[in-house]
């Protein structure tokens, strides 16, 4: 038999192994399948004869479709170009995960990286897949790059001239773009014909979203700035492109932005990005932009990978076999037959190489001028592409199996640590895993925990009824009340609430009696000084340890409010350093993290943390059981606005009090903020006294991760596999590691 | 039957309790006020209103309700029907909330319709179970006496 200590450690080690294996196998999916690309002879002679095309590729981070198409959009130049039909707008679909690195990869290679890249988003390695930048660099063209330094890490030796700006420091949204724009003076001078492709990646918009939110007044300003840059490039290309030359300007977004200013999820705001393409010079008139009058309202829908194929076509290069974009070049040239032949051959090759079960439309001798064949081919392209996209999102089945096995062993071991006198109700908590099989219940997981939270408290109240201990009944009622307050705290930011109300079922009863106060968060954000003062008073009253732990973070909030950044930075460093001595003196690391946590949360949530803290205290006072512990602890995770979508991760708090990008500190603050609910709850109920309860929670989290992995396996062909089930696995991994760690403290 | 002022107090009180419970279980506080009121009324109508006609004194009513929570005492058959009816009505209203988070976007998923329907279905099931139970108990008692 294994001793208790052995079970404790082995279960944790197994969980870590399983997580590592999972991450590795998802990342490895991207690296392995690239077959050696047969380099077919470049038509170099062809290139020499015609003067070479030029391309400006401009990426605006977090540029969602409505930033351009809404009537309030300040991008008047771009909009007028589109309505005048000098430029063509496309509605591109950004596949999951909607974070920068995989989206750039899609634009560059025409392939869709797997979900694993969301985990490696921060640690970029050199790109191995065939992409248009290394290709055109190989045929002797010069590429200049200014913007997000992810590109430089992806393609370290491809740029002749470059400057990278750091993409992770989100509180900087002016310098980060000025550092890109200032290069335009030299790059766009008429005399200096130094580049064939100029790539710009503007990060400012994304940073505003992350640090100030999606409704910030800075966003229209930034859009105007971007519009001016587009205007400048447009003017230069128009004047410098001769009649026998071709120049292209492509402006696109890598991913969108939610109403809250974040991204990473799969809502239309995040997945629909604009791609605007200008063509200058030769055959400028020959554009098949279509006859729609409403080019701004209903742009053709494309995939982001289509842009990659278009650029290969622009430079007249063969498209690599991995790429499965459908070139958009037919919108910009008259030679439709050549376009169809090339695209058809490309897809025919892929279908043969991948042994897809799609029959070809016509064999060797296709008459590409035939109208019917053309329209049939268009449909066929889309079928092949969607099939390829479906097969691209593979799930590593074998390692999933191994992970599930490891987790099951860890689960049995950790359940061996449970107290011997178990009641049957302790096992009920595992029943919640059933809900993971419904995608909408994963998306609304917070609702389930909230409802169960109310339910367990109610059941507890009923059991206490016969004793009718007045103080106890009071405490239970107070606990239910606090739970209800905390539930509604971030309710207005939930997916369902910000959805267009016309999509939801209509109200059945009249709402004459209703009053709609602005939601609590906005009210609290409007009067920060009063809120900080009252909150600190409440905290002083409610917190029994040293008052010093409360005062420092409040001072930091004030410093930030009056924009005394330097003082605040010093103070924040002091708070971070004080974690260790405080944890030593109070005997709990969680209590040590409290000052830092209070300093990094948004002003509106200081009070919420107190509510959660008090719930923890009531919990230990009432001496509740493990089921109550798991439900309330999990609800407290969702109180602060978390969900199973990556877009609810708040980067703002991660960067509080940092003036440069320090990965470890940012990671620490992100983790602290994301788990602020459970941390405060455990602080309140004094974590050291509930070791056995934490064990239950850990076992539950292992079982939950197991279930999500099984779901991932079962639903690997489900429509929502990348938008719902995979983020759930990522969150489960975070949970299992976090609660495993807490047990060690 | 309770006297009129006592009955009025009893009904109002139980209505308030149901309203507060609904809010504590997550019903909106600022909006859907009529909806919550209707739900509370339905629960009251199913559980508290019959009690008004059943009990003769307030003391007995409170006693039976307290017995319910402690699972002790023996209610008369009529009282047990009432108790089963009320408990199942509440359980039905509770369980029906499970359809809210599903993303089917049907009109009947709108609060409080599922809970209203759940409340009435639960009440019917409760009455059915209570009557069956009484029947079974009587049958076994009859069989026992017969054997003697």
Image (cartoon, rainbow, N blue to C red):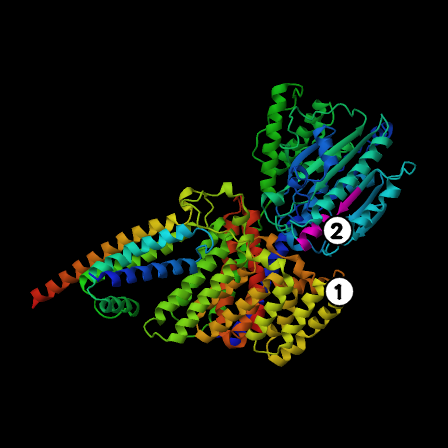
Task: Determine the chain carrying the residue at label 1.
Answer: A
Dot 1: few (<14), some (14–19), or many (≥20) neighbours within 10 Å? few
Q: Which one is in front, A106 or A138?
A: A106
Is A102 drawn above or below residue B83 in the view shown? above
* In the image: residue B83, left or right of residue A122: left
Q: Is residue A481 visible?
A: yes
* In the image: residue B24, left or right of residue A638: left
Describe the element under mark 2 as helix, strand or loop: helix
Is A238 drawn above or below residue A637 in the view shown? above
Which mark, residue A324? none
Dot 2 or dot 1: first in sequence order is: 2
Q: Nearer the viewer, mark 2 or mark 1?
A: 1
Quarter where residue A83 is shown: top right
Q: From the top left corner, tell me how far across and down residue A207 is, in percent.
A: 71, 52
Q: From the top left corner, tell me how far across and down residue A321 is, in percent.
A: 69, 37
Q: From the top left corner, tell me how far across and down residue B51 is, in percent.
A: 24, 60
Residue A207 counted in the magenta span:
yes
Instruction: Kindly identify the residue that appears in the image at 35 percent across and 55 percent down.
Output: B40
Q: Determine the residue located farthest toward the bottom in the rendered image.
A: A585
Q: Which one is in front, A222 or A310?
A: A222
- Quadrant where the C terminus of chain A sits is bottom right
Task: Determine the chain carrying the residue at label 2.
Answer: A
Is B36 drawn above or below residue B57 in the view shown? above
Describe the element under mark 1 as helix, strand or loop: loop
Q: Which residue is mark 1?
A: A564
Is A626 drawn above or below residue B7 in the view shown? below
2 and 1 marks in contact (CB < 8 Å): no
Q: From the top left corner, tell me how far across and down residue A634 is, in percent.
A: 51, 63
Q: Which residue is mark 2?
A: A150
Q: Which segment did they paint magenta?
A: A199-212
């Amino acid at each position: 038999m294994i001793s208790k200590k052995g079970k404790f450690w082995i279960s944790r080690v197994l969980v870590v192994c399983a997580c590592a294996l999972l991450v590795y196998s998802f990342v490895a999916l991207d690296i392995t399948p690239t077959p050696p690309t047969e380099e077919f002879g470049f038509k170099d002679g062809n290139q020499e004869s015609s003067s070479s095309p030029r391309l400006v590729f401009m990426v605006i981070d977090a540029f969602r479709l409505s930033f351009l198409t809404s009537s309030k959009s300040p991008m008047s130049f771009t909009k007028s170009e589109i309505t005048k039909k000098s430029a063509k707008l496309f509605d591109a679909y950004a596949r999951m995960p909607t974070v920068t690195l995989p989206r750039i990869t899609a634009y560059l290679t025409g392939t869709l990286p797997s979900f694993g890249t969301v985990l490696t988003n921060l640690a970029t390695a050199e790109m191995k897949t065939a992409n248009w930048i290394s290709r055109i660099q190989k045929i002797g063209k010069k590429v200049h790059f200014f913007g997000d330094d992810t590109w430089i890490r992806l393609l370290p030796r491809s740029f002749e001239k470059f400057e990278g700006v750091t993409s992770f420091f989100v509180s900087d949204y002016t310098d980060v773009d000025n550092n890109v724009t200032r290069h335009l003076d030299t790059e766009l001078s008429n005399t200096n014909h130094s580049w064939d492709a100029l790539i710009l990646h503007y990060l400012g918009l994304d940073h505003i979203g992350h640090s100030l939110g999606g409704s910030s007044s800075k966003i229209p300003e930034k859009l105007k700035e971007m519009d001016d840059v587009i205007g400048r490039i447009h003017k230069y290309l128009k004047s410098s492109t001769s009649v026998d030359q071709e120049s292209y300007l492509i402006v696109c977004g890598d991913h969108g932005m939610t109403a809250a200013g974040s991204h990473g999820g799969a809502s239309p705001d995040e997945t629909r990005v604009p791609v605007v393409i200008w063509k200058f010079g030769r055959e400028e008139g020959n554009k098949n932009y279509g006859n729609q009058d409403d080019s701004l309202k209903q742009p053709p829908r494309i995939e982001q990978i289509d842009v990659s194929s278009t650029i290969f076509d622009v430079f007249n290069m063969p498209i690599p076999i991995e790429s499965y974009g459908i070139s958009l070049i037919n919108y910009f040239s008259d030679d439709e037959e050549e376009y169809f032949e090339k695209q058809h051959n490309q897809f025919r090759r892929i279908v043969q190489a991948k042994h897809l079960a799609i029959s070809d439309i016509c064999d060797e001798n296709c008459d590409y001028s035939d109208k019917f064949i053309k329209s049939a081919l268009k449909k066929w392209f889309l079928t092949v592409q969607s099939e390829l996209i479906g097969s691209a999102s593979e799930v590593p089945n074998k390692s999933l199996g191994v992970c599930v096995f490891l987790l099951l062993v860890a689960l049995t071991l950790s359940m061996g640590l449970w107290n011997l006198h178990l009641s049957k109700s302790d096992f009920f908590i595992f029943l919640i895993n059933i809900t993971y099989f419904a995608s909408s219940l994963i998306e609304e997981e917070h609702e389930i925990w909230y409802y169960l939270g109310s339910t367990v408290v109610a059941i507890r109240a009923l059991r206490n009824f016969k004793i009718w201990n007045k103080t106890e009944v009071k405490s239970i009622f107070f606990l239910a009340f606090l739970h209800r307050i905390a539930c509604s705290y971030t309710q207005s930011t939930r997916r369902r609430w910000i959805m267009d109300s016309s999509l939801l079922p209509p109200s059945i009863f009249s709402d004459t009696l209703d009053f709609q106060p602005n939601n609590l968060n906005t009210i609290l954000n409007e009067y920060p000084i009063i809120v900080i003062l009252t909150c600190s008073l409440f905290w002083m009253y409610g917190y029994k340890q040293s008052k010093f732990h409360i005062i420092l973070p409040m001072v930091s909030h004030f410093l930030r409010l009056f924009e005394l950044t330097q003082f605040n930075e010093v103070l924040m460093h002091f708070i971070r350093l004080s974690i260790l001595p405080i944890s030593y003196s109070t005997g709990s690391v969680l209590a040590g993290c409290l000052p830092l946590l209070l300093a990094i949360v948004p002003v509106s949530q200081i009070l919420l943390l107190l509510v959660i803290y008090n719930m923890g205290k009531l919990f230990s006072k009432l001496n509740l059981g493990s089921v109550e512990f798991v439900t309330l602890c999990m609800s407290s995770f969702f109180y602060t606005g978390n969900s199973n979508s990556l877009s609810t991760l708040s980067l703002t708090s991660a960067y509080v009090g940092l003036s440069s990008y320090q990965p470890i500190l940012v990671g620490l603050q992100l983790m602290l903020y994301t788990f602020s609910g459970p941390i405060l709850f455990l602080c309140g109920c004094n974590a050291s006294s509930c070791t056995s309860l934490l064990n239950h929670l850990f076992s539950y989290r292992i079982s939950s991760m197991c279930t999500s992995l099984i779901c991932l396996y079962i639903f690997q062909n489900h429509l929502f596999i990348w938008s719902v089930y995979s983020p759930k696995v990522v969150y489960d991994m975070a949970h299992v590691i976090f609660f495993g760690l807490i047990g060690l403290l | 039957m309770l006297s009129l002022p006592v009955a009025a107090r009893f009904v109002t009180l139980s209505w308030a309790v149901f309203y507060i419970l609904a809010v504590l279980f997550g019903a909106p506080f600022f909006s859907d006020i009529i909806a919550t009121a209707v739900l509370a009324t339905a629960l009251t109508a199913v559980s508290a209103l019959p009690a008004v006609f059943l009990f003769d004194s307030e003391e007995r009513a409170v006693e039976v309700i307290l017995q319910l929570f402690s699972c002790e005492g023996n209610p008369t058959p009529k009282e047990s029907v009432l108790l089963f009816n009320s408990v199942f009505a509440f359980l039905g209203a509770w369980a029906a909330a499970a359809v809210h988070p599903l993303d089917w976007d049907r009109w009947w998923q709108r609060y409080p319709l599922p809970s209203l329907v759940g409340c009435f279905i639960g009440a019917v099931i409760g009455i059915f179970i209570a009557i069956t139970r009484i029947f079974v108990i009587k049958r076994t008692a009859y069989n026992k006496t017969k054997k003697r």
